Image (cartoon, rainbow, N blue to C red):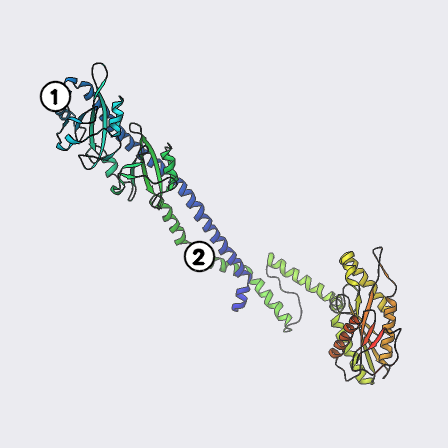
């Protein structure tokens, strides 16, 4: 089998269709399975992230609550008289601190003006520092226990978390402020958040919406940095407004990640557990690679099996096609094809045999259809060429002449536009009938185009060709003089005619071309007349009020 036949073979097309279906199915599985796994794994990862965030948030909240409660107990137990004795106050604070050392950077008491009265452990740097402008100091003066903004401590020179509570006298008046300071890096405070990782690249964030600040993070470079502006991370914006839950977002660094938010109620903070989707959905990527990797072998196996099966199935068809091809080339006579199996191929072969028989019976009808115009029944251009050739051969044998009239209808297009193609077809049939009545039975009338006709006048005595042609042209114009009635509509039609005459020395194409050109000259001369092609003998007599013009 040649390469060309393989390329155009129905088997090849079926196999290509099968490969396309396999590829489509593979792509469909690729995307559907990927989306399913992505949703499933995404939901599982989000649930895990939420549990981790809640656990870490609860741990931090409990540690802050413990420090608040301890600070309130110390403030409530502090004897107001010690406020006037800094040394005794420092010793007293030392005993409390040693008992429960939750504040890694110590305790200090400041008067209502923000000046330090006593601290423990004693820090010389605190003696000259005023805390009057600190948020936690201002809040404590109003009588509330307040968790201050995480900041770089004035004394510690590292990130700290201050918590302040008022010290009241017996009458409930605020006499001083007790502040406990915990460094964020203190052991046992934020260790779980700062040292834990989620997967290979995920981790935690501790955010203070009030201060718009990353308090702490698994990534040390993010700690104590301001949060991104609104619009950079939509899920972060929602979390800053109070949303707590899970979602997929793109962070400020452009990395897509699964995030879960959980509140730290005591401080008004929230914890974010985050994991890049690239890591979370790594199983999805592995499944995708698996599908792609094994698609090639599957297609190869399918190709081999499909080709073998289809070739065996269509082998009788190949043989029948080859047999029919040899018949068309004349190598063997026309005969029914053998039927190998009673299946679709056998049914097709039997149908071909019936068609072959029908074609044989209809050969005459097909020959007529090939040589005649289907609309008017007149000879078409093919039969006209044959008749014209025969006329020229007779002219050579008998030393006679022939004439050719090329007729083109005037005003036919408006009929088509007004009555449609069916109306135009009816008009053409009537025109053909009138022209046929204007010529001899031995002459040829053919339709060669939409509204173009040709008349061949053969076997004319030498010297009489132009007279005969002009007479026929006059008859044709007279035949067109009365209007046509098409679909109860009166339709005027005219005709422009080109005439060419010749003898045995003429060529058929030259004669037809000369008449065609003469017809166009008749059109240019005003239509409704005939013109004689140049190169013929002068015809002195004018015809019918100048409707005949002879070309020079």
Which one is nearer the viewer's eye here, 88 or 301?
88
Which label belongs to residue 476? Answer: none
Q: Nearer the viewer, mark 2 or mark 1?
A: 1
Residue linked to disc 2: 301
Q: Determine the image quadrant of residue 182.
A: top left
Which one is nearer the viewer's eye here, 266 or 302?
266
Residue 123 x, y percent position in the rendering: 13, 31
Above or below residue 551? Residue 144 is: above
Which one is nearer the viewer's eye here, 391 or 305?
391
Using a 10 Å C-alpha cutoff, classify the residue at mark 1 as few (fewer than 14 neighbours), some (14 to 19) or many (20 or more).
Answer: few
Q: Quadrant of the C terminus?
A: bottom right
Above or below residue 147? Residue 497 is: below
Which label belongs to residue 85? Answer: 1
Single out the residue that lies furthest toward the top.
Answer: 171
The answer to whether residue 181 is left or right of residue 437 is left
Q: Is residue 490 visible?
A: yes
């Amino acid at each position: 089998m040649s390469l060309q036949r393989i390329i155009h073979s129905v088997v090849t097309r079926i196999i290509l269709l099968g490969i396309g279906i396999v590829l489509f199915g593979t792509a469909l599985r690729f995307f559907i399975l990927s989306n399913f796994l992505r949703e499933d794994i995404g939901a599982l990862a989000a649930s895990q992230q939420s549990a981790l965030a809640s656990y870490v948030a609860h741990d931090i909240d409990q540690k802050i609550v413990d420090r608040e409660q301890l600070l309130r107990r110390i403030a409530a137990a502090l004897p107001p008289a010690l406020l006037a004795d800094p040394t005794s106050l420092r010793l007293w604070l030392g005993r409390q601190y040693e008992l429960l050392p939750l504040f890694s950077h110590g305790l200090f008491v400041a008067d209502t003006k923000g000046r330090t009265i006593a601290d423990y452990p004693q820090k010389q740097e605190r003696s000259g520092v005023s805390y009057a402008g600190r948020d936690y100091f201002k809040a404590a003066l109003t009588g509330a226990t307040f968790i201050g903004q995480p900041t770089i401590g004035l004394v510690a020179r590292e990130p700290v978390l201050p918590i302040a509570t008022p010290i009241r006298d017996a009458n409930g008046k605020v006499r001083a402020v007790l502040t406990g300071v915990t460094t964020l890096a203190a052991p046992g405070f934020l260790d779980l958040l700062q040292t834990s990782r989620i997967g290979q690249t995920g981790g935690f964030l501790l955010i203070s919406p009030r201060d718009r600040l990353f308090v702490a993070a698994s990534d040390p470079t993010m700690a104590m940095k301001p949060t991104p502006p609104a619009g950079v991370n939509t899920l972060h914006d929602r979390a800053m407004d109070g949303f707590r839950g899970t979602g997929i977002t793109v962070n400020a660094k452009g990395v897509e990640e699964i995030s879960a938010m959980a509140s730290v109620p005591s401080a008004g903070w929230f914890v974010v557990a985050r994991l890049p989707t690239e890591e979370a959905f790594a199983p999805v990527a592995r499944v995708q690679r698996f599908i792609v990797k094994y698609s090639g072998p599957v297609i190869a196996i399918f190709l081999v099996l499909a080709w073998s099966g289809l070739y065996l199935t269509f082998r009788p068809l190949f043989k029948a096609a080859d047999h029919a091809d040899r018949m068309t080339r004349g190598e063997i006579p026309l005969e029914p094809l053998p039927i190998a199996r009673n299946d679709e191929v056998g049914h097709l072969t039997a149908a071909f045999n019936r068609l072959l028989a029908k074609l044989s019976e209809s050969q005459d009808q097909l020959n007529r259809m090939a040589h005649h115009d289907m609309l008017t029944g007149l000879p078409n251009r093919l039969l006209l060429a044959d008749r014209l050739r025969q006329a020229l051969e007779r002219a050579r044998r008998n030393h006679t002449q022939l004439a050719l009239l090329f007729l083109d209808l005037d005003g036919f297009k408006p009929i088509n536009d007004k009555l449609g193609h069916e109306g135009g077809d009816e008009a053409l049939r009537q025109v053909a009938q009138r022209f046929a009545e204007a010529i001899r039975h031995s002459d040829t009338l053919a339709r060669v185009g939409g509204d173009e006709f040709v008349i061949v006048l053969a076997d004319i005595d030498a010297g009489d060709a132009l007279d005969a042609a002009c007479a026929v042209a006059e008859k044709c114009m007279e035949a067109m003089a009365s209007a046509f009635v098409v679909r109860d509509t009166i339709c005027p039609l005219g005709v422009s005619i080109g005439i060419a005459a010749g003898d045995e020395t003429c060529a058929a194409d030259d004669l037809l071309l000369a008449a065609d050109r003469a017809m166009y000259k008749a059109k240019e001369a005003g239509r409704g007349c005939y013109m004689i092609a140049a190169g013929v003998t002068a015809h002195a007599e004018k015809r019918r009020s100048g409707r005949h013009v002879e070309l020079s």
